[in-house]
């Protein structure tokens, strides 16, 4: 069920990106499937959404608690299986990320912790 929510959101992001952005994805090598950590920079608020367009497989993104409190968006993020990062409780988020990796999922974390 989570993958259904994820893929629906990914399709919506793809449609919005196609009409609003020029995505130029330059891959120097194929990204292997299976468990991996993706750690991109975070220059804009659209990065977490656009990053889902890079891989065909679902990914789990660690996202700040305040984003989960946005009506509708927060419910979608929970349903899609993304991880809520609550300030002061990073251990819980990292434990959840480890479980996702053990399940063979890709985990995306923005190491800057905010928009740069």
Image (tube, rainbow, N blue to C red):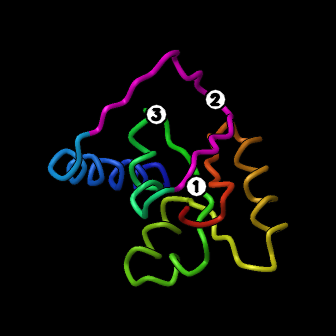
| Residue carrying label 1 | 61
Few, some or many residues within 10 Å of mark 2 (<14, 14–19, 20+): some
| Residue 86 at x, y percent in the picture | 70, 77
**Residue 110 to residue 87: above or below:** above
* Position of 51 relative to 85 (above/below): above
Q: Quadrant of residue 94?
A: bottom right
Query: What residue is disc 3 on?
Result: 55
With 30 as the anchor, is 53 left or right in this view? left
* Residue linked to disc 2: 34
Range drawn in magenta: 23-42
Whole-percent x, y for residue 51 in the image: 45, 45
- Residue at 30%, 53% in the rendered image: 13
Magenta stretch: dominant SS?
Answer: loop
Q: Residue furthest left?
A: 19
Say the numbered circle drawn on residue 90. Answer: none
Q: Which residue is situated farthest in the right direction here?
A: 91
Pick the quarter of the image with the C terminus: bottom right
Foreground disc of the pair 2, 1? 1
Sequence order check, earlier mark of 2 and 1: 2
What element does badge 1 sit on? strand
Q: Quadrant of residue 63?
A: bottom right
């Amino acid at each position: 069920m989570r993958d259904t929510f994820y893929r629906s959101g990914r399709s919506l992001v793809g449609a919005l990106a196609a009409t609003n952005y020029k995505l130029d994805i330059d891959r120097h090598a194929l990204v292997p499937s299976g468990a991996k950590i993706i750690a991109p920079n975070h220059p804009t608020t659209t990065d977490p959404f656009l990053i889902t367009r890079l891989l065909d497989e679902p990914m789990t993104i660690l996202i700040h608690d305040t984003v989960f409190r946005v009506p509708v968006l927060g419910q979608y993020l929970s349903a899609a299986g993304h991880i809520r990062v609550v300030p002061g409780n990073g251990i819980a988020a990292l434990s959840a990320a480890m479980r996702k990796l053990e399940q063979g999922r890709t985990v995306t974390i923005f190491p800057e912790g905010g928009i740069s």
